[in-house]
Amino acid sequence: MAHTIAYIHTSHVLIPLFTGLSKQELPEVESFHMVDESLIKNTIRSQSLTKTTTRRVLAMVQSAHDGGADAVMVTCSSI
């Protein structure tokens, strides 16, 4: 049974980078991507990581798990 990793991004421009890295470094692992640009926009506007944004990220992690991910990586260091 193949393992699956989900990547959560705050910008769609990261999808090709992480797709390539996954194929190169984890060729036996399937992957999919989730993007929500408002996460970083709201964090910048608030100048901090808010409870609301934290809840939304956790909901995305749960959604990724529900979608079949065995592991989830949040690729934005600001959230």
Image (spheres, rainbow, N blue to C red):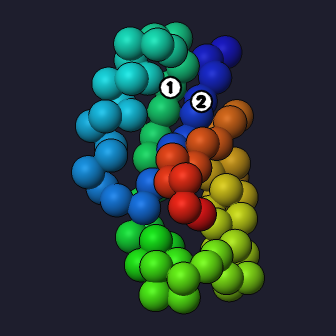
Return the mark for residue 44.
Answer: none
Asked if residue 23 lies left or right of residue 12, the reply is right
Could you give the CA–CA distance between mark 1 and mark 2, rounded to whole angstroms?
A: 5 Å
Asked if residue 39 lies left or right of residue 73, the reply is left
Q: Secondary structure at mark 1?
A: strand
Query: Quick one: 23 or 43, which is closer to the camera?
Result: 43
Quadrant where the N terminus is found in the figure: top right
Farthest residue toward the bottom?
46
- Identify whether 35 is placed above or below 45: above
Q: Secondary structure at mark 2?
A: strand
Q: Which residue type carries mark 2?
A: Thr
Q: Are marks 1 and 2 in contact (CB under 8 Å)?
A: yes
- At horizontal 38% and vertical 17% (from top left) the residue drawn is 23
Counting the numbered discs, the total is 2
State the residue position of label 1: 30
Q: Residues within 10 Å of mark 2 (few under 14, many from 20)?
A: some
Residue 63 drawn at (x, y percent): 64, 59
- Identify whether 70 is placed above or below 2: below
Q: Which residue type carries mark 1?
A: Glu
- At horizontal 54% and vertical 82% (from top left) the residue drawn is 47
Query: Quick one: 40 or 5, which is closer to the camera?
Result: 40
Return the mark for residue 4.
Answer: 2
